[in-house]
Image (cartoon, rainbow, N blue to C red):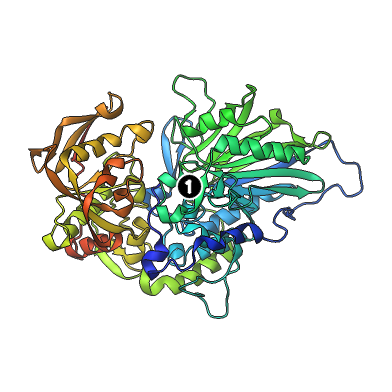
Amino acid sequence: MSATVQKNRVTRRVLAAAAGLATMGALVAAMPAGAHDRGHGNGHGNGHGHQPRTVDVQLLSFNDLHGNLEPPAGSAGNVSETQPDGTVKAIPAGGVEYLATSLRTARKGNPYSVTAAGGDMVGASPLLSGLFHDEPTIEALNGLDLDVTAVGNHEFDEGATELARLQNGGCHPVEGCYEKGRKFKGADFPYLAANVTKEKTGKPLLKPYTVWKKNGVKIGFIGVTLEGTPDIVTANGVKGLTFHDEVETINKYARELDRKGVKSIVALIHEGGAPASASYNYDCDSPGAGDGISGPIVDIAKGITPKVDALVTGHTHQAYVCTVPDPSGKPRMVTSASSFGKLYTDTTLTYDRRTNDIVRTSVKSANHIVTRDQPKAADMTSLIGRWNKLAAPIANRPQGWISADINGRGSTALEKPLGNVIADAQLEGLAPADKGGAEVAFMNPGGIRADLVHKASGSEGDGVVTYGEAFTVQPFTNMMNVVDLTGAQLVAALQQQVSGSNEASPKILQISRGLTYTLDLTKTGAARVVTGSIKLNGEAIDPARTYRVAMNEFLAGGGDGFPALGQGTNKLVGASDLDMFNAYLAAHSSATAPLAPPATDRITVIQ
């Protein structure tokens, strides 16, 4: 999800973003051979006999995998399902061993099947993938027979040069090859980035579209990421790149495909919306008041040319299968499959051989749970085992102990228990005068990538937090900053949680102990923050006073729609967020006195 992408793990871990952006051109030049003509060989055409006028093409899609090769732990690994009696059941889902089985089972009996993704396949990944710069995930996607994906904002976490390597292959420029005698081959599917161009030349960074072909059936795929990617990625990640309007870009390339005789077109868009229900089986086209979908994807969908037949979306980590009218007023399918490989979407596109177009009125789509009670795909089990063996010496180190689940990513509350722990860890680590003298700490909610789960993930035992689990929570390895901000700037930052670019979809900062205030959601915009209620250690914030504030470098750069936080002065750079988190776990927990979930009483919410 927008998840606030943060600092380039390469530079952090190896202290060298060795390759510059000069090699970006290689992205265009070195697309995988044959990527545009691949059809899955799990079926056959009609041979030399008479071909029926229409053929059903199966489009399987998913989005926002984020390197989750193993089943996501805790509540972040659940899918909500509404039962016939109206109750909601949480179903554990995800893991590429099961995703592979689900996709392979779905393809059976479908000779025309294409698999596409909506971006954020990598980035903000658990240690199993993130430690190896997401090579394991690219290998897994190759094994899943992914045909095409759009880039998401997280594909730019480590910059365009590293994205080029994931596409084209080759060992890491600094860390080299991870396995003796084995060279990373790169993705055998194309990454599409139609709305990303190079500043110097104006030319596309990656191919804007690809055409899938089988037995005369042709379907074009156009891929874009959200135009706002630079707002949620560090400057290094998007250096030298320009991000363009999604609608204008898709319409431009839809016209180009149409001129080339490709009449069936699917847009892969790394931007999304929010359905009225969190249940994956919610009927998004229900006619009731408040039903349906909201968010950026609605206006995007309404603006995309009718030449495009279906939209595969992502970014918001939501599950939906909705119809949104195109500019001519006709309904068009818009889908998203949650995140972390917990769902996949199965869409039937009826292709008319006479017009070479999709019969829009026949399009059907549904999301399906990637359940964990089906057989595991042996090749994925082997892949996970291979990489886990390499990661084990680092991943299995105990960092601390917890007495119960401490929810972060899986929490729907505005103030998250794990958010409080992380903010407290940052304040404690940076409060000493020689460490920055921090008085308060802010943590962006999108940077919390998982829960801390009490149940053992391996052989470490229940309640033990391993390095791998801590890394999964804080995978960006952001350097911490302490800066001077006035009280007025602090108040402005809190107001920016619910106003400006964050008004439609609030981003509630996680705050360290001692800071309290009231959030009145019955009001609109900045007025939602009750300014008279803001106190630090029981005292009202003084607009004229200078405060020392700790936050990660992404927030300190004004990221996630917080320009007030970017106005800090007298900056001191501290250790990484992950180091702070691990140090706090070590200092505040033991086998006999584990860390308990903290109270969530810092933000009083009026709804």
Taking depth in this image into account, of 209 and 3 the one nearest to the observer is 209
Judged left or right of residue 412, residue 596 is: left
Kind of residue at badge 1 = Ser
Residue 361 image offset from top left, x and y in percent: 70, 27
Taking depth in this image into account, of 443 and 156 the one nearest to the observer is 156
Q: Residue at x 50, y 32 (%)?
A: 282
Taking depth in this image into account, of 456 and 495 the one nearest to the observer is 495
Q: Which residue is mark 1?
A: 339
Q: Quadrant of the C terminus?
A: top left
Query: Which residue is the extreme one toward the left?
Result: 539
Q: Secondary structure at mark 1?
A: loop
Query: Which residue is the extreme one toward the bottom?
Result: 180
Judged left or right of residue 455, residue 226 is: right
Residue 126 image offset from top left, x and y in percent: 42, 59
Q: Quadrant of the N terminus?
A: top left
Q: Residue at x 32, y 32 (%)?
A: 499
Total numbered circles: 1
Residue 63 image offset from top left, x and y in percent: 53, 47
